[in-house]
Amino acid sequence: MSTNVILARMGEVTLKGLNRGVFENKLMSNLKYRLRGFGKLSIFQSQSRIWIEPKEENNEYFEDEAKAMDILNACAQVFGIVSVSFAHKFEGGYDEIAKEAISYVEEYLQNHPEQKTFKVESKRGDKSFPMNSMELSGEIGHELLERFSELSVDVKKPDFVLSVEVRDFNYVYAGKVMGHRGLPVGTAGKGMLLLSGGIDSPVAGYMMASRGMQLDAVYFHSYPYTSDRAKDKVIDLAKIVSRFSGRMNLYVVDFTQIQLDMYKNSRQDMLTVTMRRVMFQIAEELAKKTGCGCLITGESLGQVASQTLEAINITNEVVELPVFRPLIGLDKEATCDLSRKIGAFETSILPYEDCCTVFVAKHPKTHPKHKDIEEAESKLDIKQMVYNGVNNNLEIIEI
C-alpha cells in the first residue's frame, strides 16, 4: 500500500564543499518555517532530496495531487529548491513497482485524458536492486504499454514522464513544480532594500534574496503628496517579496518635509540626485542599526536620469556600505518579465505615485559633476535631514 509524499530537489546547495551542511541546515529550517501552516509534517533530507510527509492521518494537502498544489507551490518558493513533485511512496520489489506504476498512471490519465505519449525515467539509489536504471525503465514502460492501449512511447517530447526512484523505499511520480533555485535565505548576510512602489525594486529584492540574502526594506513616504494608497501598495509589494525572502521589517520614513526643503532650496535640475543621496544616507543609517551589510536598489544603467554612470557615482559617494544593483544590466522588459514571474507586476503598476515621481525635475541633469552637487546642496542641512529621516515619525512594519 502506498502513501502520498512530497519530494523536493536541492540545486546549487549540493555543489558546496565542506560547508555544505550549513547550507542544507538553513534550507531545511527555511522550508520548515514556510510549511508551518500545512499541519504536522515530517521533513528530512537524504541524497540531495528532501522528503515531506504528514505526521497525521487525513492531512488534506496530501489526499491527491490537486489538493497538494498549495503546499507544492509553497515549497517551490523557498530558495534552494529546484523542483517539487507529488509522489507515491511504497515498499517492495519489481512486482510492487510495476503494480504501483500502473495504478499511478491510471489515476493520472483520469485527470489528464488528453496526454497520449510518455517515457519512463528511473533512478536506482539502492544498488542492491537487481535491475539497473535503464532496465527498470524499459520493463515498466513495457508494462504500461500492455495495460494502456491508448498510450505510446515518445522519448524526446513525451506528454508526461513517469519517474521511478528505488531507495530505502520506492517512489513513483509524474510532473514537477519548478522552484526558483538559488541559495537558502540567511546564508549570505542581510541587506537593506530601498523599496518604492515601482516595478524594479521588488525584483531587485527578489534577486538578492535568491543569492541567500536576508532582507529588510525602507520606503520613503511623502504624505499628503503621496497617498496612503501608495503606502499600502508598497506594503503589498513587501509581502510579495517576503514570500521568497521570509520575514522582514519595512521602515517607513516620513520624507515630506525633507523633500519640501529640497524643492525650495536646491537646484531644480539636481533634485533627483540630491534626493537619492539623502535617501541613501538615511537607508545606510537604518542598515547599520539593524545589522544590514549593504544597500540594494532597483537601478538599471541609463534607464532614467539618476541612473547614468555619473549620477550613480555621485550617489555612491555619500555612503560607506556597498550598494548592490542586481538589475544594472537588464532592460525594462527583462525586469517586467521577472516581476510577472514573482507575482508583483500587477501590484507595481497600480496608479499610485511615490515620492520620486511627485517631485521629479522637468529637465534633470543627466551627467552631474561634483560642482553641480556642491551647488545643489550648499543651502541644505543634509546632516539634519538624515537625522530627521531616521528619528522623526519612523514607522516600522513587520512583514
Image (tube, rainbow, N blue to C red):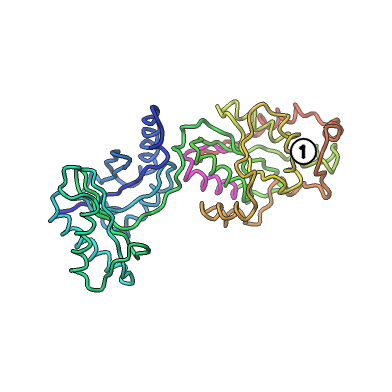
Quadrant hosting residue 142: bottom left
Q: Residue at x 65, y 37 (%)?
A: 253
Q: Residue at x 60, y 26 (%)?
A: 288
- Number of disc labels: 1
Q: Residue at x 43, y 47 (%)?
A: 77
> In the image, 335: left or right of 51?
right
Quadrant hosting residue 319: top right
**Residue 58 seen by the camera:** no
> In the image, 173: left or right of 379?
left
Task: Decide: is 142 above or below 334.
Answer: below
x and y, in percent, of residue 39 in the image: 30, 45
Q: Nearer the viewer, residue 379 or 149?
A: 149
Task: Decide: is 223 above or below 142.
Answer: above
The residue that mark 1 highlights is 310
x and y, in percent, of residue 202 in the image: 58, 46
> Start and end of the magenta stretch?
232-250
Q: Amino acid at mark 1?
A: Glu
Q: Nearer the viewer, residue 54 or 132?
A: 132
Quadrant hosting residue 337: bottom right
Q: Main secondary structure of the magenta part?
A: helix
x and y, in percent, of residue 219 in the image: 63, 40
Q: Nearer the viewer, residue 347 or 43?
A: 43
- 268 drawn magenta: no
> In the image, 284: left or right of 179?
right
Say few, some or many: other residues with alpha carbon within 10 Å of mark 1 (under 14 / 14 to 19 / 20 or more).
some
**Residue 124 seen by the camera:** yes
Q: Nearer the viewer, residue 37 or 118?
A: 118
> In the image, 34: left or right of 307?
left
x and y, in percent, of residue 47 in the image: 29, 39
